[in-house]
Image (cartoon, rainbow, N blue to C red):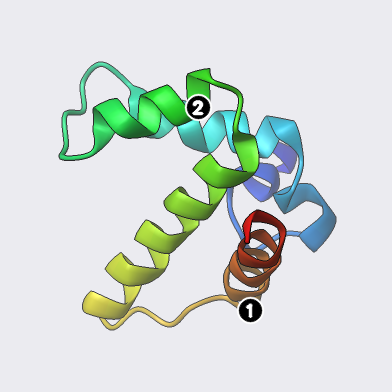
Amino acid sequence: MDAIETHSYAGGFAKIKTPLASCLRFADLLAPSHAWEGMHKFRQVVYRGDIEIAALLQNGWVIEYFQEMDVPLHANLTKYYQVLEKNCG
């Protein structure tokens, strides 16, 4: 359960911001079985070590996708995006 909580946005807010949580999400997006527009740029950001910028991009895509699908946004997802946006300028 701890891995699910760390991997998702529904757990405690402190776990959302951990390097482990980011690595899990980035690994999902960069898996060789996936190919999508922007993947190369995202990979460069992740491999460069710009974790907050990569997290900002990833969270923005999740929010956009959820809104397009009429999926309610969890408060932690919105809060984390706002924190990242502030930190990344």
Which x, y percent locates residue 76? 66, 70
Which x, y percent locates residue 50? 60, 32
Residue at disc 1, secondary structure:
helix
User: Of all residues shown, which one is farthest toward the right?
Assistant: 14
Mark 1 to mark 2: distance in Å? 25 Å
Q: Relative to 27, is 7 on the left or the right?
A: right
Q: Residue at x 84, y 55 (%)?
A: 14
Q: Residue at x 43, y 62 (%)?
A: 60
Pointer 2: what residue? 46
Which x, y percent locates residue 82? 64, 72
Crowd around label 1: few <14 · some 14–19 · many ≥20 (10 Å): few
Q: Nearer the viewer, mark 1 or mark 2?
A: 2
Q: Relative to 43, is 38 on the left or the right?
A: left
Q: Is residue 9 above or below residue 15?
A: below
The quadrant in which the C terminus is found is bottom right
Q: Relative to 11, is 44 on the left or the right?
A: left
Crowd around label 2: few <14 · some 14–19 · many ≥20 (10 Å): many
Q: Residue at x 48, y 78 (%)?
A: 73
Which x, y percent locates residue 49? 61, 24
Residue 66, numbered label: none
Return the residue nearer the eye: 42 or 28.
42
- Compare marks 1 and 2 and give the one earlier in the sequence: 2
Q: Residue at x 15, y 40 (%)?
A: 37
Return the residue nearer the eye: 42 or 71.
42
Give the residue type that dot 1 points to: Ala
Residue at disc 2, secondary structure:
helix
Give the residue type that dot 2 points to: Val
Pointer 1: what residue? 75
Q: Is residue 21 above or below residue 75?
A: above
Q: Is residue 18 above or below residue 77?
A: above
The quadrant in which the N terminus is found is top right
